[in-house]
Amino acid sequence: MRNRSLLLSLFTLFSLLVALPAVSGPQTIDAVQKEIDVFKNSGEHIFAPQTMSRVAQYLGAARLAAEQNNVEGTQTALNTASEKLTEAKQTANDFLAQNLNLFRLRQDAQESVGLIVSSRQNSRDDADVFSSQQLLEKANSSFELAIMTRERGDLNNAQQHLNDANRLYTEAFKTSLPRLSELAASAIGAAGSSGAKRYAPVTYQTAKDRLAEIRAYVDGLSDSPPQRPAEAVELGHEAKYLADNIKAWRKNAGSHEELVLKSKDFNLRMATVLGLKTGSTALLSGISNRDLLHAVEQLKQDLAAERAAHQLQLEAMKIQHEEELQSRLLAQTDVLKESQRSQLTEMKEAFRAKLERETFEKKRQEKLRTLFKKDEADILINLDGSLLIRLSSLQFASSKSKIESKYYDMLGSLKAALELYAERKVRIEGHTDDQGDVKPNQVLSLKRAEAVREFLIAAGTDGARLKALGYGEVRPIASNGFPQGRAMNRRIDIVIDAAK
């Protein structure tokens, strides 16, 4: 109860401080930092986490601006940090004021479940302990969600999370009480065996009263939940500790000087660690508990200030890193955009060139087809880009390779066709049917191809482009079983290679 009264007093004092009007005037980094430390030491900063994160960011920005001698920037950031801190205090104050009973329930549930979890000894305890622990974890999650959603202004969802937290904390609390009752009874029994009823009667009786409250609630004899039930176990251990020590002191028939000297020696060692001025020995030491307490509080404040300074430094470095990262990102974005523009230009240029080539090729092929009369030649475009001009009208006398004069005009058209593709190599391929032997047919097909080549060279075509080949009967395009098929197989094919 004493702890609850202290909590209420601190809460009332905090409410009054929040209600005081803000003092006008320029802010300083140390002043704002001290105000933050006081608020954090109260523990109530957890009820406004998002706002406190903004406070830290603005204070970090103020420190960074101060290092850069930016007075205006420093003051602006400090003013904003101070405003956000006031907002965080008000948010925490409102949350506590509206949910004080839930906050008390949360403390009781955490203490009770924490105690039974830490005292778990065998598998028989696992099911109940695990259930309580699970409920507590779910309740803590709902409680944190309630804080965050309320801070964002989502009051409907916040209230739903608060209702869930209240239900789950209550279930976790109730589930832990039977095991807690056993632990308290065990601790009080051990204290009784040590003579606590005689040597520590006040603490022993208080522990028993707390245990009685727990049992009455668990057995359904009382509707009022026990307050701070975990203290029953702690008081049982404390009663045993006191009884054991008091009995030991009473066994010493001499004076109690040793106890005093031990206390003074402990104070001397504590004072030395804390850097206080002391006497040369424990016998002459005059360090009071008040001095030690004051030194510990000062050390605590110094450590808190150091941690806060480190945190602010980290926040400032984080902001600076984010700015540098943003700057690099913008630079990379510009480079990427320029690269994309360049690639797009190249793609457009490549597409334009491709379109031009295709248009040029199409026109060239159309012109090629106009060079030959009907039935003089068949023109095929292969997938690899090469062209095949099959001189279907060119015929040779049986077993002869001499070109008759009636084909000169057609071969003149062939020369003009090859001039259209002056940049490409040309193969002149001779073919025969399967009549006769293979070797003679191959020789004959080669001679006919060479005859065409020589005619073209004589007509002015560059001979270096032209290559004559004889395949004989090995590449038929029709069946040799019929006269029409054999006539088709006796042919000259002009292959214009694909462009490189």
Image (cartoon, rainbow, N blue to C red):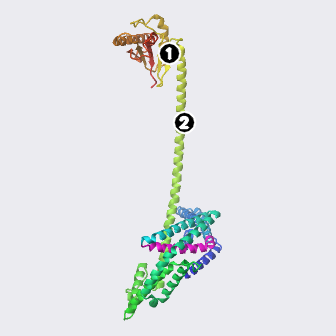
> Residue 457 appears at what percent x and percent y?
42, 12
CB contact under 8 Å: marks 2 and 1: no
357 vs 313: above or below: above
Q: Amino acid at mark 2?
A: Thr
Total marks in image: 2
Q: Which residues are magenta?
A: 94-121
Q: Which residue is mark 1?
A: 378
Q: Is residue 309 visible?
A: yes
Element on which disc 1 rests: strand
Q: Which residue is mark 2?
A: 345
272 vs 137: above or below: below
Q: Amino acid at mark 1?
A: Asp
Give yes or no for residue 272 being in the magenta stretch: no
Would you call the spot at circle 2 few (<14 residues within 10 Å), some (14-19), or many (20 or more)? Answer: few
Q: Residue at x 56, y 64 (%)?
A: 53
Q: Is residue 150 visible?
A: no
Would you call the spot at circle 1 few (<14 residues within 10 Å), some (14-19), or many (20 or more)? Answer: some
> Residue 299 appears at what percent x and percent y?
47, 76
Asked whether, in this view, residue 128 is left or right of residue 469, the answer is: right
Element on which disc 2 rests: helix
> Residue 40 appears at what percent x and percent y?
54, 71
Q: How much space separates mark 2 and mark 1, taking CA atoms? A: 41 Å
